[in-house]
Image (spheres, rainbow, N blue to C red):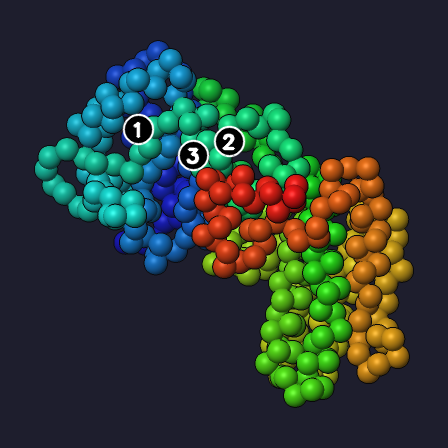
Amino acid sequence: MEFMKGLELCNGFFLDIAKPILDKHYPGLVYSAALIGYGSDVLGYDDEVSTDHMWGPRFYLFLNEKDIHMKQEIMEMFGKTLPYEYKGYSVNFSRPDPIGVRCPERISEGLVSPLVFVHTLNEYLTEYLGTADLDSLTGTDWLSFSEHRLLALTSGRVFHDGLNIQQDLEKLRFYPEDVKLYLIASNWSLIAEEQAFLRRCYDVGDTIGSIMICGRIADRLMRLAFLYCGQYAPYSKWFGTAFARLPIDESIKRTISCSVEATDIEERENQITAAQKLIADLHNELGITAPVDVRIESYYGRKIKVIFADKMVGAVMGKLSGTEFEGYPLIGALSGVPNFTNAFDDPARRALIKRLYSE
């Protein structure tokens, strides 16, 4: 069987199978259906490897508060009426394992247990994001969200929208301007902290330290590219894949790649400083701030190449004067630290994350 992308599979499954069933059994029901949230299929990065768990014909069904009491009834109706397979893929799934993971489980008789979830939108947003109040978000609210979850909520597809949930999801489309500027300043600040250390580490015999610093600067440059493109960055599994698809000049991608692949210090330093200059040029081209005079130069007369990324920080922070971000530490968002998933991906920890900025 030829692999079919999950988003197309789920779109067809809903329109061909589930919607006719809903329309027949609940002709007056007002609802929305979508594939958003978790899953590589939502982002379009799924392949055959993805099909082993939590993947297949599936969707979220969103109901009004007044209709949510019908959840169990609707799921029982699906169990009796859904087919066992759709386009060769099992519609039935196993019971959840201890961490909630379900796998396709082929059956030929009995009730179907589909990968369908029924919520109100407020219930779902509160569970997935930590709040459903999208009209009163503060700067620290935005910084406390998992960036990957913001991406997952604004990706995917709404198959049917009787409740107009797309209008609510659009409120999360991208960071507000001040939040974006703060994140830009933070990433340039984190680069500035280590801009001279790549060569310095190497000169004292610490080759591995030099390589690791190059990787960290490259990561920050890539995050800046996402911000300048107005796109959320996914978590580490898909970070490089998504970066490769950004609508930026290929020379930026190539130079960053060359910097982390370099096997000698001259190439590593030349490429990473060139990459910083290219991203700074992109900043200027977009008119984010007044033009910043950035050039590759010597670090206080030493044999160290830098662009003095501090200039970028100063220019951006100048635009945040008088805002709530003016006194925040320039640490960016916690979800910008790739392997801190246990901290930033749990909505229950948002209050603790917000304290990083307010105290």
Q: Residues within 10 Å of mark 3 (few under 14, many from 20)?
A: some
* Residue 323 as seen in the image, left or right of residue 202: right
Element at label 1: helix
Q: Which residue is mark 3?
A: 127
Q: Secondary structure at mark 3?
A: helix
Q: Quadrant of the N terminus?
A: bottom left
The residue pinned by badge 1 equals 18
- In percent of width and height, residue 206 lies at 63, 84
Amino acid type shown at disc 2? Thr
Left or right: residue 1 compared with residue 270:
left
Which numbered disc flags the more N-terminal residue, 1 or 2? 1
Q: Which mark is residue 131?
A: 2
Q: Quadrant of the C terminus?
A: top right
Identify which residue, 32 or 295, lies in the foreground: 295
Amino acid on which disc 1 is placed = Ala
Can residue 249 be seen in the rendering of this structure? no
Q: Residue at x 60, y 43 (%)?
A: 355
Residue 237, placed above or below residue 258: above
Question: Mark 1 and mark 2: span between their CA atoms?
Answer: 29 Å
Determine the CA span between mark 3 and mark 2: 8 Å
Query: Along the polypeptide, which appears first: circle 1 or circle 3?
Result: 1
Secondary structure at badge 2 equals: loop
Q: Residue at x 24, y 48 (%)?
A: 97
